[in-house]
Image (cartoon, rainbow, N blue to C red):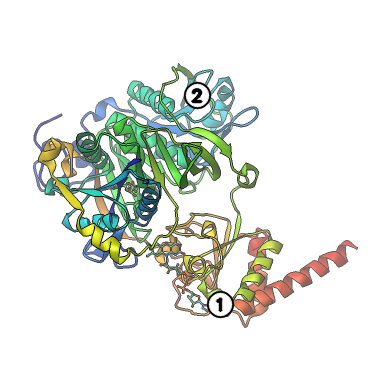
Amino acid sequence: MKEESCSTCPSKSACAGGCERSDAEMAEMYDLDADTTEGHMVWVELEHGEGVPKVSEVSLELLSKAKRFGDQRVIAVAFGRESVREIAPVLYSHGADTVYHVRNPSLIDFHLPTFAHGLTTVVERVRPNTLLMGATDLGMELAATVAWQLKVGLTADCTGLDIERGVLRMTRPTFGGNLMATIVSEGRPQMATVRPGAFPVEEIEEGRRGTLINWPIKMVEGTVAEQVSDVDVQDCASEPTELIISVGAGIGNLRNLELAKEAAERLGAELACSRSVVEKGWMEQTSQIGQTGRSVSPRVYLALGVSGAAQHQVGMSRSKNIIAVNNDPEANIHQIANVSIIGDVGEFLKRLLERLDRLDRANGASEA
Amino acid sequence: MRILLMVKQVPDTNTNLLDESKFSRKGPMVLNPQCEYALDAAAALKGDGRVVAFTMGPSKARHALFRCLELGADLAYHLCDSDFAGSDVWATANTLSKAIMEFEPEFDIILCGGHAADAETGLLPTMLAAALGIPVINRCRGIRYEGGSLIANRERNGIPSELIVPSKSLVSMIQGSNVHRLPSLKDLQDARAKQIKTLDRGSLGLRKDECGASGSFTKVDAVFAADHSREGIELVLDDTDTALDLVIDVFQGDER
Ligand SMILES: Cc1cc2nc3c(=O)[nH]c(=O)nc-3n(C[C@H](O)[C@H](O)[C@H](O)COP(=O)(O)OP(=O)(O)OC[C@H]3O[C@@H](n4cnc5c(N)ncnc54)[C@H](O)[C@@H]3O)c2cc1C
Ligand SMILES: Nc1ncnc2c1ncn2[C@@H]1O[C@H](COP(=O)(O)O)[C@@H](O)[C@H]1O
């Protein structure tokens, strides 16, 4: 590392000042050993159940994205026992050229100290240019620990990634989703966690081949919290919610809330809410969507009487279809909705339930 | 229980945050909402032990510490130095870990918020635990004593579980009780007698390139306003049939 530091940019390498630099110049400025790093590495998150583990969707998205960078080989790193070998073809078909199988007979559940050690050793061996993982609960913990150990930068929760001459430009929402920031990282690998769903899976090439490398490791001693019990696991291990009906203060009264509940039941949707509704004591905090609640990205998000405050949007703006019912045409929620219905929520619900009744009767009649 | 509490002051996200394409910290500031949960948990667990709050931030970040002292903390450290400006998560973890090792190495638990409402990386708790070499439990919705052990309710991958918190570990909270607790008159009076110690780079024995912007590996290159807006169809409810057909179609999987 060079001693000099520039006062206008955080680079540790000497820089000539006047930091208006192009990406290519930045590659030079930020990267102390660019010529010796090569490849895009993806940590593959697996869901271990009975039999062959399942590759998480976000890992496939990242392999696909890394392949589309198009400039360097793609390396997948998967942890687990023997059965992990069987998923290698899936990884190749999504873009991996090389699969590192990090293995140990006792390696089943996520064990942070061992995973961090294992991934760090592969990185030190391969020296990739980038290291990507899903911004999932496990991905975040692993990324933070590995970045600390490797002494490299880490950008969390990215929704945009671009690479130019080896420099990764990472774009992420910040300040409760109000702002976007583009971040570059000094040193290698350039690490990012990426939001699930940010990139599509494209160009699956069945039968594509690659190289599998065995990477045995020792379990690392290190305390982790011991589990006392699973609380109501059955209730929660369910599939992610595909359909959500969310009520805001505009729902107006408990009678309308009952109608919303009924509509949710009949459409097979989960009922959620804004913070205002929690503050009124009408629904539990566990149902709150937004910055201080849950983040969701269902196929359909029907917002009833929700104004669409920034803190609410940050939890739902990634929904595939957003339908908003709000009697104020100027409400923010209409800006982010694919379908905006300007009207009264109570009226809407009444008519929706009538319509569902009619459909049921029609179906009943045709089945009879 | 000797509890260390890591808190952050953040801009109120209700206000305008973009000022000539830069983050603006000129508007009103509040204690990070998820740090409120950690503060609440610290007060509830304290017993006859003590709570020590830490923050790294500019001089007005003291206000976040005042709130902690009013609501249960006994002592606070303010890590404040212009050399700390521009810290990314690595530099923040490095600086906070130095302060803890130097000034409060004897603790039973460290409590953090899960996410900060401004930079929102949610990485600091794990990285701080890595820096201190201690276990971490993230995504806690509650923490309590039971049968002589400390039990945390964690929700990870959507699955809740109860965990025994090992001694000397770090716990970050994504939920809790009472976000807007008001201090009583007595709390306010008591707080006045409590101390905030200011620590600068020199007192932590950090070199200039180990903290702040020059100790950071990431650099913000551009900031711009988020735009979530979509092309959409607008209907009035008077056109009931079209509106309801559309809604039911979308629910039943007819993409648009
Ligand atoms: C630090 C912080 C964190 C926060 N976190 C969250 C969070 O996680 N989640 C969250 O949701 N909020 C959060 N908030 C609060 C947020 O700023 C808003 O206050 C809240 O989302 C507003 O809820 P709402 O849309 O239900 O209510 P309102 O803003 O009151 O909106 C009600 C809407 O209903 C419409 N309406 C009224 N009557 C009718 C009718 N009869 N028919 C149709 N439409 C009608 C109105 O036009 C209006 O648009 C947070 C705030 C802060 C400061
Ligand atoms: N500058 C700081 N000083 C003290 N604690 C911090 C600081 N930054 C982050 N934290 C703690 O780390 C949590 C998560 O922050 P972040 O990783 O930035 O989203 C916060 O809720 C705080 O508990």
What amino acid is at disc 1?
Gly
Residue B1 position, x and y percent, is 35, 40
Residue B142 position, x and y percent, is 47, 48
Residue A345 falls in image quadrant: bottom right
Determine whether the beta carbon of the residue marked 1 sits less than 8 angstroms from the nearest atom of ligand 1: yes
Q: Residue at x 38, y 63 (%)?
A: B180
Q: CA distance from mark 1 to mark 2?
A: 59 Å
| Vertical arrangement, residue A23 with respect to residue A282, above or below | above
Looking at the image, which is closer to me, B249 or B119? B119
Query: Which of the labelled discs sits on residue A298, or is there none?
Result: none
Q: Residues within 10 Å of mark 1 (few under 14, many from 20)?
A: some
SS at mark 1 in the image: loop
Q: Residues within 10 Å of mark 2 (few under 14, many from 20)?
A: some
| Residue A189 visible in rendering | no
Residue A187 falls in image quadrant: top left
Foreground: disc 1 or disc 2: 1
Q: To which chain does the residue with label 1 belong? A: A
Q: Which residue is mark 2?
A: A210
Horizontal relation, residue A13 to residue A280: left or right: left
Residue A366 position, x and y percent, is 86, 65
| Residue B243 visible in rendering | yes
Residue A231 position, x and y percent, is 59, 43
Q: Is the residue under label 2 in contact with that under label 1 (CB below 8 Å)?
A: no
Which residue, as the protein is rendered here, is positioned at the far bottom? B238
Q: Residue at x 40, y 25 (%)?
A: A222
What amino acid is at disc 2?
Gly
Looking at the image, which is closer to me, B129 or A362? B129
SS at mark 2 in the image: loop
| Vertical arrangement, residue A168 with respect to residue A72, above or below | below
Q: Which residue is mark 1?
A: A252
Residue B36 falls in image quadrant: bottom left
